[in-house]
Image (cartoon, rainbow, N blue to C red):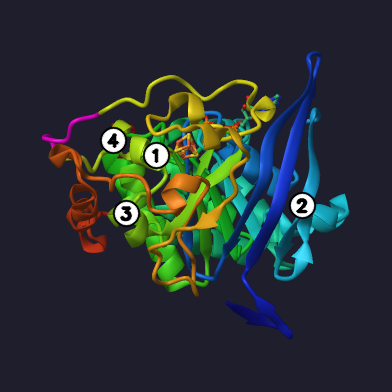
């Protein structure tokens, strides 16, 4: 819970978010009643297949939807103020300041014709009234904080002259320039090799521990979720289908879709013996037209009752309802009617949780200095 200037509550409280896109073919619903909270210093992971609505959730909150996108409904309280009702100018102050976002593709997020120094120093000055010299000192400090140990050199470089890992660190530095309380990271490491991915993730984790930063981490990598998350929401076809704290979710994933994801998605934290099992079918394109469970066409446990609308309900066996209740959007899973996950001994939840302890520890990850495993040098 968050307490500042008399406000007590979560840092971010998203309620019933509904977003649509218009096109020549009519309205397409992308989000249907998405709700979640984020507390200070925690990492909330949003996981789901391609097209499930992860990025649209982030863009809706940041007010960065493309022209044909619109938030139809909902509230998103950031420190008690509704982001969705703010004027563009108010939102501009928050974006890049208290709330920042980093994207998967760092090279297209940096301006190629300005040096990192130009861009980072301007980012620092945009959110504080310091002079250029002081802003430069601050920029150097931030670059060091994100693990770039020759910050003077990095400041002189143009984006193309940095490796992928270094650019992604610079993007994190740009986001930190506004001293954010919340960082939304949308697949920030998908384009990077596994070593750099592990380093960037460790950096995010240590920033949460050392500062009051909270992170919404969007990913399709279930192993990364196991390593990084405090809490998890699983999205499917524009809806939250399961939410829980990370240990509970990995010990007992209850929604058939979550179980399918755990069996289907390879991760850098996998052991060699893990057998991958694909979820049959794909996310339905026009999911807004489905009245009942949106996962039904792919679910092995479907019964007639699944054709009725499904709501997010407490899992009957959930012990800790107080902090972050374990909920599923499946009447059968909520009632405990489905077989427990883990029947396949080559892919048990225990395997996945065990990988958390095998992930690289903070001390094992080196700072990036003159280059990284992508081979380029600053
Ligand atoms: N500009 C757009 N116009 C129309 N529909 C869109 C637009 N952007 C996203 N959508 C639709 O919104 C839904 C959610 O998309 P979103 O980009 O949030 O998926 P995602 O979970 O981030 O997937 P990925 O893992 O591939 O990034 C999809 O059905 C997508 O087709
Ligand atoms: S509601 Fe029915 S179809 Fe949907 S996930 Fe649950 S069992 Fe499967
Ligand atoms: Mg996306």
Q: Which residue lies under the disc numbered 2?
A: 74
Around disc 2, counting alpha carbons within 10 Å, would you say few (fewer than 14), some (14 to 19), or many (20 or more)? some
| Image coordinates for residue 166, horizontal then vertical, percent | 41, 42
Q: Which residue lies under the disc numbered 1?
A: 256
Query: Of marks 4 and 2, which one's residue comes earlier in the chain?
Result: 2
Residue 68: which quarter of the image? top right
Mark 1: C-beta under 8 Å from nearest atom of ligand 2:
yes
Which residue is at 58% across, 30% downward? 108
Front of the two marks 4 and 3: 3
Q: From the viewer's perspective, is 67 left or right of 275?
A: right
How far is mark 1 from mark 2, CA to CA? Answer: 27 Å
Which of the image's four quarters has the C terminus? Answer: top left
How far is mark 4 from mark 1, CA to CA? Answer: 11 Å
Front of the two marks 3 and 2: 3
Q: Nearer the viewer, residue 377 or 204?
A: 204
Task: State the residue lying farthest toward the front.
Answer: 304
Q: Are marks 3 and 2 in contact (CB under 8 Å)?
A: no
**Residue 299 in view (yes/no):** yes
Mark 3: C-beta under 8 Å from nearest atom of ligand 2:
no
Q: From the viewer's perspective, is 277 left or right of 240?
A: left
Query: Of marks 4 and 1, which one's residue comes earlier in the chain?
Result: 1
Q: Which residue lies under the disc numbered 3?
A: 252
């Amino acid at each position: 819970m968050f307490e500042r200037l008399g406000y007590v509550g979560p840092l971010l409280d998203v309620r019933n978010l509904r977003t649509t896109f218009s096109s020549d073919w009519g309205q397409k619903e992308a989000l249907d009643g998405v709700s979640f909270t984020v507390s200070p210093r925690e990492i909330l992971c949003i996981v789901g297949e391609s097209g499930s609505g992860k990025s649209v959730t982030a863009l809706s909150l940041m007010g960065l939807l493309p022209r044909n996108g619109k938030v139809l409904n909902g509230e998103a309280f950031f420190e008690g103020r509704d982001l969705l009702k703010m004027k563009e100018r108010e939102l501009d102050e928050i974006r890049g300041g208290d709330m920042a976002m980093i994207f998967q593709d760092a090279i297209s997020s940096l301006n190629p014709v300005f040096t990192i120094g130009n861009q980072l120093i301007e980012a620092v000055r945009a959110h504080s009234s310091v002079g250029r010299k002081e802003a430069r000192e601050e920029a150097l400090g931030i670059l060091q904080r994100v693990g770039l140990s020759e910050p003077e050199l990095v400041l002189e470089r143009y984006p193309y002259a940095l490796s992928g890992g270094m650019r992604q660190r610079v993007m994190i530095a740009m986001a930190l320039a506004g001293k954010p309380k919340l960082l939304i990271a949308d697949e920030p490491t998908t384009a990077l090799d596994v070593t750099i991915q592990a380093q960037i993730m460790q950096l995010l984790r240590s920033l949460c521990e050392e500062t009051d930063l909270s992170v919404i981490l969007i990913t399709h990598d279930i192993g990364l979720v196991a390593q990084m998350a405090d809490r998890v929401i699983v999205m499917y076809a524009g809806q939250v289908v399961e939410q829980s704290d990370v240990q509970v979710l990995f010990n007992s994933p209850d929604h058939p879709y979550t179980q399918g994801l755990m069996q289907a998605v390879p991760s850098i934290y996998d052991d060699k013996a893990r057998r991958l099992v694909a979820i049959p079918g794909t996310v339905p394109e026009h999911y807004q037209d489905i009245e009942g469970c949106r996962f039904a066409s792919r679910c092995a446990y479907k019964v007639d009752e699944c054709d009725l609308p499904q709501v997010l309900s407490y899992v009957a066996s959930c012990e800790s309802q107080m902090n972050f209740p374990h909920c599923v959007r499946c009447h059968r899973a909520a009632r405990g009617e489905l077989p427990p996950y883990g029947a396949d001994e080559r892919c048990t939840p225990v395997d996945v949780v065990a990988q958390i302890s095998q992930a690289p520890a903070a001390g094992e990850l080196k700072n990036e200095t003159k280059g990284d495993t992508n081979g380029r040098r600053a």
